[in-house]
């Protein structure tokens, strides 16, 4: 046996012996969950405007950009009586199949309204393939303080361009009252809470 043929297995065993005496890096998951990086690519989230209207306009660009064909979107038209986003359309159906998704983030780059972002949530495993298909209700962000659940009208005096410029900062007072009294009064009376005579909440940054 040549010297080179003898050294090859010895060098391999040397790596093994070195690893035997190193400190083990076993993580006690799921008892101790690892903290992810701030820009970690985890579960997706559909975002809202500060007044609660949805940012998704149903353009389907995220679905076109997805290399794994994991996103399915159906857009629909907004109406004055039933408005979900400040634009003409909104995402009526939004699904992400996490059995296919590779969490690459290309859908985030394709979104023109910043409606789709990625969270730090990484626990997506499930025993059922059906449960890996997340629907719009599961992906839509929750309501923060000052937000009102959709559908509701846009902020009085504002246009859809104002939403995309970040000029609307919170919901109109009439929106909250409409949601609270719509079960007890006719739709015409509830809609009147959006009238010009209502005192305006903080609409524009800096005012």
Image (tube, helix red, strand yellow):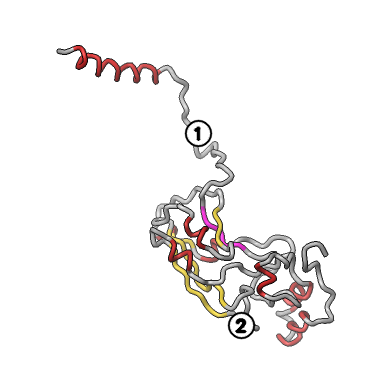
Specify which label sits upstream in the sequence, 1 or 2.
1
Residue 28 bears which disc, if any? Answer: 1
- Against 71, is 184 above or below? below
Mark 1 touches mark 2? (CB < 8 Å):
no
Please identify the quadrant where the N terminus is shown: top left
Left or right, 162 with reference to 100: right
Q: Please report the bounds of the magenta region as a residue range.
A: 43-47
Left or right, 35 with reference to 100: right
Residue 17, quarter of the rendered image: top left
Q: Which residue is rendered at x = 42% and y = 56% of the image?
A: 101
Q: Position of residue 198 (x, y in %)?
A: 83, 78
Q: Position of residue 192 (x, y in %)?
A: 77, 84
- Against 163, is 23 above or below? above
Q: Position of residue 117 (x, y in %)?
A: 56, 57
Q: Which residue is rendered at x = 65% and y = 83% of the image?
A: 80
**Residue 45: within the magenta?**
yes
Looking at the picture, tell me which residue is in the foreground, 191 or 205: 205
Residue 200, quarter of the rendered image: bottom right
- Measured in 3D between alpha carbons, the distance from the residue under mark 1 to the one under mark 2, in whole angstroms, is 52 Å
Q: Which residue is rendered at x = 50% and y = 62% of the image?
A: 110
| Mark 2 crowdedness (10 Å alpha carbons): few <14, some 14-19, many ≥20 | some
| Mark 1 crowdedness (10 Å alpha carbons): few <14, some 14-19, many ≥20 | few
- Against 165, is 151 above or below? below
**Does the magenta stretch mainly form a helix, a strand or a loop?**
strand
Left or right, 3 with reference to 53: left
Circle 1: element type: loop
**Residue 65: within the magenta?**
no
1 vs 2, front mark: 2
Please identify the quadrant where the C terminus is shown: bottom right
Q: Which residue is mark 2?
A: 79
Q: Which residue is rendered at x = 73% and y = 83% of the image?
A: 191
Q: Position of residue 5 (x, y in %)?
A: 19, 17
């Amino acid at each position: 046996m040549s010297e080179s043929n003898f050294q090859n297995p010895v060098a391999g065993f040397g790596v093994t012996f070195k690893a035997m005496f190193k400190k083990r890096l076993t993580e006690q998951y799921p008892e101790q969950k690892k903290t992810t990086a701030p820009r970690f690519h985890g579960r997706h989230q559909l975002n809202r405007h500060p007044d609660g209207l949805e940012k998704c306009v149903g353009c389907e660009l995220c679905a076109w950009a997805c290399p794994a064909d994991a996103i399915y979107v159906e857009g629909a038209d907004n109406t004055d009586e039933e408005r979900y986003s400040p634009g003409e359309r909104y995402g009526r159906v939004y699904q992400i199949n996490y059995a296919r998704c590779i969490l690459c983030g290309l859908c985030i780059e394709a979104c023109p309204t910043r409606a789709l972002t990625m969270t730090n949530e990484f626990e997506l495993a499930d025993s059922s393939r059906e449960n890996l298909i997340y629907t719009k209700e599961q992906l839509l962000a929750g309501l923060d303080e000052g937000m009102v659940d959709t559908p509701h009208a846009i902020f009085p005096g504002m246009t859809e361009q104002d939403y995309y410029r970040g000029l609307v900062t919170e919901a109109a007072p009439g929106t909250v009252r409409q949601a609270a009294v719509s079960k007890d009064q006719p739709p015409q009376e509830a809609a009147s809470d959006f009238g010009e005579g209502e005192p305006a909440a903080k609409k524009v940054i800096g005012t």
